[in-house]
Image (cartoon, rainbow, N blue to C red):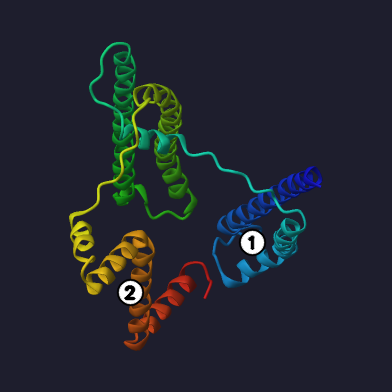
């Protein structure tokens, strides 16, 4: 059953991936067709033009939606077995480095030097990647901010293609460099982990230090129910601080939305959005 389910999920994933690529290619093709005027020679994003193309795409969209819905049923019939995830190498390295001694003697000195060398190389690589990304961002902003790069011409495709030609190499280079450094960081983490394991061998994990506030509350809670309640509240807030922050931010967001509805801002934004969409691509 497990092998059959694995094969069925694999085939389904391949078919859904192929259908997604086909649908994406059709969407891109129809967008360029509308932008370049198509057969009538009018390059305008109107509601009628977009509607005509979407109606032609409707069978492919329906098939894709049905395949996605079938995937949920398929995963219920052939559930994927739970796998025990391996801990991330970089996180494990970060945790073990907290207990790594900074001064060693004998053979361990080579391990310590190897770790420091890898750390130095990574700092240099990330610094170089940051400089390259900053340069690419500055060049892109300067290019987009110069009106001379977007002259008023009859064929609007020319400045758009020129923009892509100048901007995309910068974006691609920055992405490739960051991706390369990230891959090297993973390889470097595996190398460092071996050396750090030697350095921390026999070192017991240090318990996290308690804050001064909690120590005082714990001391006073022995003779006072009020401080015992404060101690429980403090521990709960520390344990669930991320959830509490999410709830607070969510409540603030809902409050601002409600305030915007009552002071009329929602209607103004909605009206402007309709006007912009209608004037730009004909979608109201």
Label 1 with label 2: CB-CB less than 8 Å: no
Residue 127 higher or lower than 7, as above or below: above
Q: Nearer the viewer, residue 54 or 157?
A: 54
Q: Nearer the viewer, residue 133 or 89?
A: 89
Q: How many marks?
A: 2
Residue 230 higher or lower than 70, as above or below: below
- Residue at image position (34%, 62%) is 241
Q: Quadrant of residue 196?
A: top left
Q: Earlier in the sequence, mark 1 or mark 2?
A: 1
Give the image location of residue 78, x and y in percent: 76, 53
Q: Nearer the viewer, residue 92 or 253?
A: 92
Give the image location of residue 175, x and y in percent: 43, 38
Give the image location of residue 130, x and y in percent: 31, 36
Horizontal side of residue 44 vs 15, given as left or right: left
Question: Are there few (<14), some (14-19), or many (20+) residues within 10 Å of tag 2?
Answer: few
Identify the residue under disc 2: 252
The numbered disc on residue 40 is 1
**Element class at badge 2:** helix
Question: Are there few (<14), some (14-19), or many (20+) residues within 10 Å of tag 1?
Answer: few
Horizontal side of residue 41 vs 234, given as left or right: right
Q: Quadrant of residue 201?
A: top left
* Residue lying furthest bottom: 262
- Residue at image position (34%, 29%) is 203
Q: Nearer the viewer, residue 277 or 116?
A: 116
């Amino acid at each position: 059953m497990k092998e059959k389910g694995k094969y069925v999920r694999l085939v389904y994933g391949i078919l859904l991936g192929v259908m997604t690529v086909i649908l994406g290619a059709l969407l891109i093709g129809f967008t360029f067709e509308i932008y370049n005027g198509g057969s009538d020679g009018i390059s305008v994003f109107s509601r009628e033009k977009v509607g005509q193309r979407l109606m032609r795409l409707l069978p492919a969209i329906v098939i894709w939606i049905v395949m996605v819905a079938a995937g949920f049923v398929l995963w219920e019939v052939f559930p994927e077995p739970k796998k025990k995830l391996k801990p991330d190498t970089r996180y494990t390295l970060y945790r073990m480095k907290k207990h790594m001694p900074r001064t060693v003697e004998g053979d361990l000195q080579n391990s310590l030097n190897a770790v420091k060398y890898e750390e130095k190389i990574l700092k240099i690589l990330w610094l170089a990647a940051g400089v390259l990304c900053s340069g690419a961002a500055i060049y892109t902003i300067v290019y987009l901010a110069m009106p001379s790069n977007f002259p008023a011409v009859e064929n609007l495709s020319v400045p758009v293609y020129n923009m892509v030609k100048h901007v995309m190499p910068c974006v691609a280079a920055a992405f490739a460099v960051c991706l390369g450094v990230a891959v090297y960081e993973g390889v470097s983490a595996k190398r460092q982990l071996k050396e750090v394991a030697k350095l921390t061998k026999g070192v017991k994990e240090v318990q996290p230090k308690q804050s001064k506030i909690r120590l005082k509350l714990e001391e006073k809670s022995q003779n006072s129910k009020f401080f015992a309640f404060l101690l429980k509240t403090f521990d709960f807030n520390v344990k669930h601080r991320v959830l509490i922050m999410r709830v607070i931010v969510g409540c603030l967001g809902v409050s601002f939305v409600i305030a915007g509805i009552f002071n009329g801002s929602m209607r103004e934004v909605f009206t402007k959005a309709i006007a912009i969409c209608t004037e730009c691509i004909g979608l109201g």
